[in-house]
Image (cartoon, helix red, strand yellow):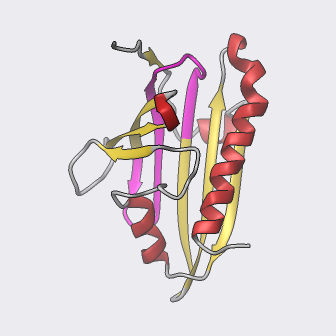
């Protein structure tokens, strides 16, 4: 059975600062920036996040603006189609969700920023922003729990306390 798809409003750089719901986690990682970037763009990216069942790149490499990927949650409860509007190779990437299998968000944007601190360490900032339609806003506390879980799993993956 085919599931319905719900279109979301495209997000951009300005949504990262104006979103009604914004969560960010900054972690200093004792690994070179290039190694962290490789993890964040690998075919197994985010496999360490327990609340995700899979991330699939749907565009060929090399990646850049316009790159697409699909993210699935366990049991296929939610599937998201993402489009990257920014891609600064080795440093920063940002996407918006174009379509989802549930009407949970009007707009959803994420930003990943990797900054070298030294040849053997970096700072990774992951920002998640969204706007839920009025009927779905009661789920905002649960969305915050889910995002915090993704941050926690990522900290564990990179060995950050």
User: Is residue 93 one of those drawn in magenta?
Assistant: yes
Q: Is residue 108 above or below residue 47?
A: above
Q: Is residue 39 above or below residue 32?
A: above
Asked whether 106 or 78 is in front, the reply is 78
x 53%, y 58%: residue = 48
Could you tell whether 122 is left or right of 91 in the image?
right
Q: Position of residue 4 (x, y in %)?
A: 41, 12
x 39%, y 43%: residue = 84
Residue sticking out furthest to the front: 75
x 53%, y 55%: residue = 112
Q: Position of residue 110 (x, y in %)?
A: 55, 44
Q: Position of residue 99 (x, y in %)?
A: 43, 24
Q: Is residue 125 above or below residue 149?
A: below
User: Is residue 6 one of those drawn in magenta?
Assistant: no
Q: Quadrant of the C terminus?
A: bottom right
Asked whether 142 or 16 is in front, the reply is 142
Could you tell whether 161 is left or right of 33 in the image?
right
Count of numbered labels shown in the rendering: 0
Q: Position of residue 96 (x, y in %)?
A: 48, 35
Q: Quadrant of the N terminus?
A: top left
Residue sticking out furthest to the left: 60
x 53%, y 88%: residue = 120
Q: Give the residues drawn in magenta, as a range.
A: 86-109
- Prevailing secondary structure of the magenta residues: strand
């Amino acid at each position: 059975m085919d599931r319905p798809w719900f279109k979301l409003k495209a997000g951009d750089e300005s949504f990262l600062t104006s979103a009604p719901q914004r969560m960010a986690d900054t972690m200093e990682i004792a690994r070179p920036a290039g190694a962290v970037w490789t993890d964040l763009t690998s075919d197994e990216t985010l496999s360490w996040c327990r609340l995700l069942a899979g991330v699939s790149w749907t565009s060929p490499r090399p990646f850049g603006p316009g790159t697409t990927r699909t993210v699935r949650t366990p049991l296929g409860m939610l599937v998201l189609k993402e489009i990257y509007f920014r891609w600064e190779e080795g440093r920063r990437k940002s996407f918006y969700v174009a379509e989802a299998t549930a009407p949970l968000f009007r707009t959803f944007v994420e930003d990943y920023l990797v900054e070298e601190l030294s040849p053997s360490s970096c700072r990774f900032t992951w920002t998640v922003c969204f706007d839920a339609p009025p009927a779905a806003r009661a789920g905002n506390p649960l969305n915050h729990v889910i995002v915090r879980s993704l941050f926690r799993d990522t900290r564990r993956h990179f060995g950050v306390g």
